[in-house]
């Protein structure tokens, strides 16, 4: 599946909507959901790009070890959660 950044952003937000406030998802959750039964690993960087866009828009934040990190410089496993007021 060749998903656009907007489509992947929608998948991320839909998955977060299914979770309790403050809960996180892994980028691979979004990649798997977008791929359906297809190969999801090629979608990992596009999901991270969509996540960076959502961070720039102030909609989500990226965490590592429970701490908010900059998605542009984060290395290794990350989690995504909605920004709460």
Image (spheres, rainbow, N blue to C red):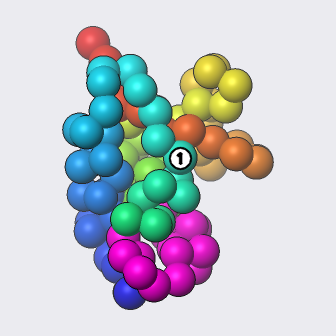
- Asked if residue 44 is among those painted magenta in the image, a careful observer would answer yes
The vertical placement of 30 against 83, above or below, is below
Helix, strand, or loop for circle 1? Answer: loop
The vertical placement of 49 against 21, above or below, is below
Residue at 30% x, 21% y is 21
From the top left corner, tell me how far across and down residue 53 is, in percent: 39, 52
From the top left corner, tell me how far across and down residue 66 is, in percent: 62, 21
**Magenta stretch, overall SS:** helix
Label 1 Cα neighbours within 10 Å, binned few <14 / some 14-19 / many ≥20: some
The residue that mark 1 highlights is 26
The quarter of the rendered structure image containing the C terminus is top left
Residue at 60% x, 74% y is 41
Q: Is residue 40 visible?
A: yes
- Asked if residue 36 is among those painted magenta in the image, a careful observer would answer yes
From the top left corner, tell me how far across and down residue 44 is, in percent: 56, 67
| 39 sits left or right of 78 in the view | left
Q: Which residues are magenta?
A: 34-47
Residue at 47% x, 41% y is 25
From the top left corner, tell me how far across and down residue 72 is, in percent: 62, 48
Residue at 61% x, 37% y is 70
């Amino acid at each position: 599946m060749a998903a656009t950044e907007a489509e992947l952003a929608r998948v991320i937000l839909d998955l977060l909507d299914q979770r309790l406030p403050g809960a996180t998802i892994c980028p691979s959750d979004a990649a798997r959901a977008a791929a359906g039964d297809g190969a999801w690993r090629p979608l990992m960087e596009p999901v991270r790009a969509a996540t960076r866009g959502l961070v720039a828009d102030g909609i989500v934040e990226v965490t590592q070890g429970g701490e908010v990190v900059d998605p542009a410089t984060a290395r290794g496993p990350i989690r995504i959660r909605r920004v709460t007021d």
